[in-house]
Amino acid sequence: MASIAGVVFLVPRYWVAWEAQRGESSRAVVASRAMGLALARQPAGTPLVLIDDDPRGLPALFTITEHAGYLRDAVPPARVPDVFLFVGSVPDFLGGRPTLSGDVSRDLLATDYWNRIRPVLDRPAVVVAASRFDPVAYQDALALPGHVTLAPGVVALPGFTGANGGLPPNSAAFTSPGPGPLSSWLPVWLAPLLILVLGVIGWPWVASTFPGRRRIAAALSPAVGLAAISVAAIVTDAVGLRLQGWTGVVPVMAALGGGLAMLARSRRRGDGGARPAPIGRRAIPASGHITDIARTSSP
C-alpha cells in the first residue's frame, strides 16, 4: 500500500516537472538571439528586461527560469549581468509593480525579480516580450502604440527601446551575441570527431608511458588527451592568458607539443618499441647454474 501511495503521489508531480522542463523549439532560440542582437547594439550597461509569466503555478518556476537561461545564452558574454526577468503582465510592469497571483512560490519569484529590476530602470533599458515565451504579454505589447518590432514575434515596449544614439563598445564580448539554432546532426558527427582529436593529442603521452602496448594506448588516449588539455588550460590561465579568441588554442598546442616531446625523448632512449616483460616475472640468464643464481641473490 505504501508503494502504491508513493506512486500515486509522486508520478503526477514528476510528470508536471518533466512537462515544464521540455526543451524549447528552434523558434525560441531565434527569438532569444533577436533580443541578444538588440542588446548588442546598445551601450554597455543597458538593461534587457524580458516580460514573461506562466499562470500554471509550480511549472512557472521551471519554465520562466528556463526562458531566462535561453536569453542569457543569446546575449554577448559580457552582457549576461544586464539580463533581467519581469514575472508578470505588461500593464503591471508599466504600472511599476510586480504581478501577484496568490501562489506563494510564484509571488516570491515575481517579487524577487522585481526588486532586482527596479534599481536599473533609472537608465535607458530595453524591455521586450516574445510570443514564443509569453503569448499574452506579446499581444499586450503589440497593442501599445509606439511599440518597436525587433524581429518576428519579438516586440520592445514603447519608451523602453534603449538609448537612442548611444554607441556600443568595440569589444566583441559586448557586441557578439550567442549562436543561433544548431543542427540536430551536429552532436552526431562532432562527438566522434572530438574523441578522435583528443585521441591524437593523448596518443604521444600514452605511447611514451606504455611503449609497445598499442591497445592500451588506443583505449587511454582520449582520456589522457582531455587531461593534458585541462592541465595546460589551468597553467595558461595562471600565467595571465585568458582562454578566449586565439589564446584558446594555446592549451591544445601545449598539450600536443608536450606529448610529442615526451615521445621523442622515449624514442631517443631506445624504449619506444620495446615490449616490457610481464609484471611479476624475473628474467633468468640463458647460461649459468641455479646454484650460481641463488649464490648471487643471497646476502
Image (spheres, rainbow, N blue to C red):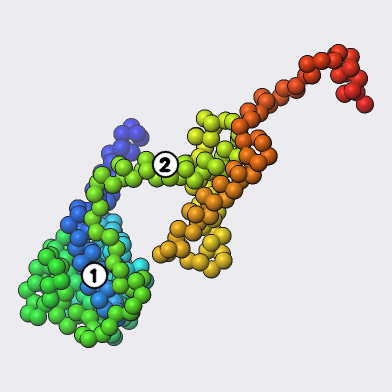
Which numbered disc covers residue 37?
1
**On-image quarter of the N terminus:** top left
Position of residue 93 measured from the top left corner of the image (x, y, whole percent): 20, 76
Task: Report the mark closest to the observer, 2 or 1.
Answer: 2
Q: Looking at the picture, which amino acid does disc 2 mark?
A: Leu
Res 96 → quadrant? bottom left
Position of residue 28 measured from the top left corner of the image (x, y, whole percent): 20, 58
Res 100 → quadrant? bottom left
Please say if 23 is above or below 125: above
Please say if 90 is above or below 250: below
Which of 158/181 is in front? 181
Which numbered disc covers residue 73?
none
Kindly identify which residue carries mark 2.
Answer: 196
Position of residue 179 measured from the top left corner of the image (x, y, whole percent): 28, 60
Is there CB contact under 8 Å for labels 2 and 1? no
Whether residue 136 is visible, yes or no, is: no
